[in-house]
Amino acid sequence: MAKQRKVIITCAVTGSIHTPSMSPSLPVTADQIAGQAIEAAKAGASIVHLHARDPEDGSPSPRPELFKPFLEAIKASTDVVINITTGGGHNMTVEERMAAALEFAPEMCSLNMGSMNFGLFPMLERKRDYRHAWEETYLANSRDFIFRNTFKDIETILHRLGEERGARFEFECYDVGHLYTLAHFLDRGLIRPPLFVQTIFGILGGIGADAENLVHMRRIADKLFGQDYQWSVLAAGRHQMTLGTIGVSMGGNIRVGLEDNLYTGPGRLAGSNAEQVGTARSIIESLALDVATPADVRSALNLKGYTEVNF
């Protein structure tokens, strides 16, 4: 009998896209980030993808000292796989974006596979009262913002975090060309399988959140990587569960969390990250599939183990 496939749920807990005025549930302080990550793990997430925020105003921050309290708290409470961003936030340098991962040497890091326009300004169309001065400006400035990750930047991250510190990567692919960039680094031997490929849909500047695009991205990934990768689907906003369900039914994994979507349904703000994880778990189990544990992920992705991190 064939072994039952296990589906990986990644939870992106806070990110750098949404601002605090958009939802009272968006975690900002170390205690809030740790608490929501731990509850997401209890609900079924086997990977938590983590950013830090300034606790005073909720703005995205690369400062390692802001990561340290919640990293230690999460590790003390659960064996979930901890994934530290190298995407950071707007206008952070590559060195700033790597700073926390360099200091704490996690099992996993995210890695955007290219430079791209990254438009958040359409969020301004929804009128709201912003609690902090930076929020509206941050969104508006994305009209003239390019997220930078050149070939040299990617090489630097692969070397300093992968080769030197033993991290594996969540390869974030926002368009078809990013898959080919990933294949380029694989061909050069700068990365090794198994790969964890996060295909991302619905960010303005990247590929659209259409089922046809999802199928096409899967087809190209299969062509480039064969059996040497784990495929995951991240769809922004209202597309989160719809495309995630299609991805799971096609043999993939799913990413949820308040970084990517603040809602659980039309007009209904999610109360927590764990709420979205619970919805994803229900979808997976309704398809007669099992949810992967952190131990399953460590085995599938050949991770170094939680005893080998610096926190």
Image (cartoon, rainbow, N blue to C red):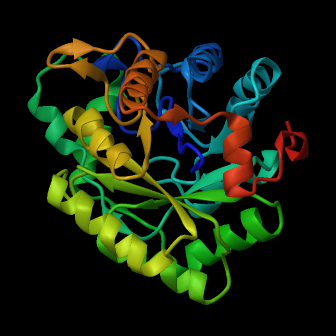
Q: Is residue 98 left or right of residue 78?
A: left
**Residue at x-position 62% and y-position 89%:** 188
Above or below 56: residue 153: below
Position in image of residue 84 (x %, y %): 64, 44
Q: Is residue 231 left or right of residue 169?
A: left
Q: Is residue 230 left or right of residue 169?
A: left
Position in image of residue 292 (x %, y %): 60, 36
Position in image of residue 34 (x %, y %): 65, 20
Q: Is residue 104 visible?
A: yes
Q: Is residue 166 left or right of residue 149?
A: right
Quadrant for residue 133, please give it.
top left
Q: Nearer the viewer, residue 27 or 174?
A: 174
**Residue at x-position 37% and y-position 38%:** 17
For the C terminus, the quadrant is top right
**Residue at x-position 15% and y-position 34%:** 124
Position in image of residue 162 (x %, y %): 74, 65
Q: Nearer the viewer, residue 20 or 25?
A: 25
**Residue at x-position 9% and y-position 33%:** 125
Above or below 300: residue 186: below
Q: Nearer the viewer, residue 19 or 287?
A: 287
Q: Is residue 100 visible?
A: no
Task: Work out which residue is located at the far bottom of the displayed protein and give it.
Answer: 188
Q: Nearer the viewer, residue 67 or 133?
A: 67
Above or below 95: residue 67: above
Quadrant for residue 56, please give it.
top right
